[in-house]
Amino acid sequence: MKTRLNIEGTFSNRITGGSMCFVNLDAMMDEEQSLTLHEYVYKNSLVNQWCPNYGWSRCSNDHLTCGEIDQCHCGDTNIQHYERVVGYLVKRNDVNQGREIEMLNRVRHQIV
Ligand SMILES: [Zn+2]
């Protein structure tokens, strides 16, 4: 994560139209984890704006789960996955092949 923040932070102030650094996480943060990560980014990077980014899963019974799962807690395995693309959550099945490959190659940082 540090390398990513360094690279993106280097260019943050040069992008006149604004920028947002989406940090892909594997699970929802609690309040303390969020505060720790905000302090880390603030103290260790030049990134001027950032946002935690989660993948989402929704079963056919409309249960929404943070993260990518293949089976819902209700037992349903008909799961639709959602990812953020340029600020908006979209169904992974609705994107073009290039974007889908990019999504699958995203590094998800572990919340510990
Ligand atoms: Zn469900």
Image (spheres, rainbow, N blue to C red):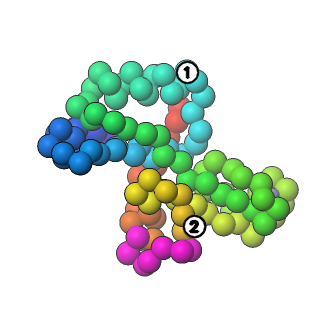
Q: Which residue is mark 1?
A: 32
Q: Main secondary structure of the magenta part?
A: helix
| Secondary structure type for disc 2 | strand
Give the magenta range: 93-99
Relative to 21, residue 112 above or below: above
Q: Residue at x 28, y 33 (%)?
A: 48
Marks 1/2: CA–CA distance:
30 Å
* Residue at the bottom extreme, as displayed: 97
Q: In which quadrant of the rendered view does residue 76 lie?
A: bottom right
Q: Report if residue 98 lies within the magenta region.
A: yes
Give the image location of residue 36, x and y in percent: 46, 22
> What is the tally of numbered marks visible in this picture?
2
Is any atom of residue 3 visible in this view?
no
Give the image location of residue 44, x and y in percent: 27, 26
Q: Which residue is mark 2?
A: 91
Q: Amino acid at mark 1?
A: Glu
Q: Residue at x 60, y 28 (%)?
A: 30
Give 94 or 30, whichever is nearer the viewer. 94
Q: Amino acid at mark 2?
A: Lys
Quadrant placement of the N terminus: top left
Q: Answer with mark 1 or mark 2, whichever residue precedes in sequence.
A: 1
Q: Residue at x 23, y 48 (%)?
A: 17
Q: Residue at x 80, y 53 (%)?
A: 73
Relative placement, left or right, of 78 versus 27 is right
> In the image, which is nearer the foreground, mark 1 or mark 2?
2
